[in-house]
Structure formats: structure tokens, C-alpha cells
Amino acid sequence: MKQRRKPIASLSLDLDNQWSYMKTHGDEGWEEFPSYLNVLIPRVLNFLKERDLKITFFIVGQDAALEKNQAALKPIADAGHEVGNHSFLHEPWLHLYSEEEIDTELAIAEKYIEKATGARPVCFRGPGFSLSRTVLKVLARRGYLCDASTFPTFLGPLARAYYFMTSKLSKEELEQRKQLFGRFQDGFRPLKPYRLRLDSGNLVELPVTTMPLFKVPIHASYILYLGVFSPMLAMLYFRSAIALCRLFRVQPSILLHPLDFMGCDDLPELAFFPAMNQPSYKKVAMMSKIISVLTDNYTVLTISQHAHQVARVDKMPLMHPSSIAL
């Protein structure tokens, strides 16, 4: 009997570095650009190689510009993974930039990402899911295939409140970050991919997937946090989310973060992050279970492969940015 073909999904990792977490959190010392990439990237590449997976790494341009990081970044493309643009300065208030500033931000990031990895990005994700109509306009003009910055959940304000409670930010810095992780109304954004019609061209918007119907997060960091209280219930939650994706024919785009693979034994100074009281071996073991559930149900692609696949569908919705809450 002919085996039924699996539906597709995509997997991406926002390669936020130690300094970018510290900067957003308001911690001193980020200006020295401390980095864990030389520990993280070999660990993740080995994890993916063991499972024969190719994913997208969204790289921060500032990291690619620093010579000390380039030896760690080069193996990503060499191993056949895709590189995406995660901005140059990794400032979650990118939506406040002028059009000229956004163009410069993307161009400089592209330059250094290509120099470090040998590959030019065609997909973008805003830091902290920061997005604006101006960002979309510039992306289309610069020839990008896909934006992956939307996060359709109602829980963004709760995540932001937790982050602010653990931060050391000034009033001005809090104002800059007031849209970090999104707004309540972001939960009304579409969950499935769609085309964006822009004056300078079209883009595929590939949202970070949240649970169908409930719009609660299902990315790996959230599952790991739930796993601190009950690994069994955390995996039940993720399996239920994937089952709902199958039921509603959602092709999930699952988000990973560096701290999904790192623990208190690696970075005790980042203990304020959820699930960072766990050692790395426990988190990697949980990640293995999460990825197994995903690959049992879907064929996993990179972001651009996913975008190309959905763009071939004639009935894919075509939307104007003005119709989306931005």
C-alpha cells in the first residue's frame, strides 16, 4: 500500500545572543557583546544532524559583524541550513524606525550575514516580533520572499509584564519596549500563511504558529517552561496542539530559541528566563521529544521552503497590510 504523504511544517531558530537578551532586559555589560554562540551552535547543529533536519537560523547582523562569532556562524550554511535576517541591532522597537533607518538596518544585516555565512537571507523575522507596514514595504522592495514576524496570540501583554517585572529598565527604556511580544489584538491575526500585497511587490507572511482556536503559544520555550512543573502535561499540551493543527489543516511554523538548548549549567546569569533553572541535558532531552512529535506528523522544511510551497497554492489569501492589526 502506498504510504500517505505527510503535510509540511517549518522549523526556525531565532539566534538571539547573550548580549541581545541582556540589552532587552536592561542588564549592564551587553555593550561588550558577550556570546555563547561557540557553545550553542555546535550543540544545535549536532542535534539537527542526528535527526536529519534542515531548518532556518535567523541571525542578528551585529553578531555576524563581529569576527569572534564568524567561525561559529559559518558551519550553519555549510551544513545546509538556511540563514534569515533577524535585524542588525536586534531592537524590539524596530517598528518605531523611519523607512530610511529600516532600510539601513536590513541592508547592513544582510551584508554581514552573507559575509559570515556565504548565504544571503530572503526571509526576515523582527526582534521581539516587532513589525510595521513600513518594515513590510522595505522587505518587499529589497526582494524578500517571506516575513515570519507575526505571532497570533492574546498572551503577548502577559509575557511582556513578566519580562518587565524581572528587568532593570528605565522609564524611557520601558516606553521603547512597550510593544515587546505584541498586543492583545495580535491574537486576531490569521494563523495560516497569506500573501501580502504591497506597492513594491508581494510577500508571503508565515506566522509563528499558536494553538488553533485558543491562540496560546506552542513554541518550544513555552513547552519547556510547562515541563518545569510537569513534563508529562507539557508534552500532552504539545501533542494536543499538533493534533489541532492537523484537524484544522494548519501547517505549523514552530519557533526555537537558543535557551531551549542551554541551561543553568551554561548560563547562570540568565536565570531570570523561564525554565533556565534546568540543566541543559534535561532541556535537550525535552527538545528531542518535542521534535519527535513534530516530525512524526509533518515533513519539516526551512522557512523559505515552506513559503515557496504555500505560495504555489492558488487559493492562498491575498491581503493588504491595512487589513491586519499592525
Image (cartoon, helix red, strand yellow):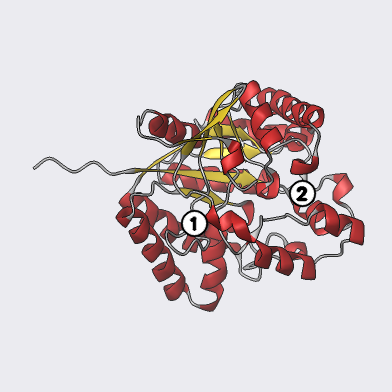
Q: Which mark is residue 236?
A: none
Mark 2, other Cα within 10 Å: few <14 / some 14–19 / many ≥20: many
Residue 271 seen by the camera: no
What's the residue type where badge 2 is placed?
Ser
Q: Residue at x 43, y 62 (%)?
A: 213
Q: Which mark is residue 20?
A: 2
Is 103 above or below relative to 257?
Answer: above
Give the residue furthest to the front: 323
> What percent of the width, then of the height, locates residue 38?
68, 43
Pointers 2 and 1 in contact (CB under 8 A)?
A: no
Give the residue furthest to the left: 1
Between disc 2 and disc 1, the foreground one is 1
Is 320 above or below relative to 282?
Answer: above
What's the residue type where badge 1 is placed?
Thr
> What percent of the width, then of the height, locates residue 273?
69, 65
As drawn, is 103 to the left or to the right of 253? right
The answer for how far apart the CA atoms under marks 2 and 1 are is 24 Å
Q: Which mark is residue 210?
A: 1
> What percent of the width, then of the height, locates residue 17?
72, 47
Residue situated in front as seen by the camera: 319 or 131 = 319
Q: Earlier in the sequence, mark 2 or mark 1?
A: 2
Q: Residue at x 75, y 37 (%)?
A: 63
Residue 157 falls in image quadrant? bottom right
Mark 1 lies on a secondary structure that is loop
Q: Residue at x 71, y 36 (%)?
A: 87
Mark 2 lies on a secondary structure that is helix
Residue 132 falls in image quadrant? top right
Is 222 above or below relative to 133?
Answer: below
> What percent of the width, then of the height, locates residue 315?
35, 34
Q: Residue at x 63, y 61 (%)?
A: 184
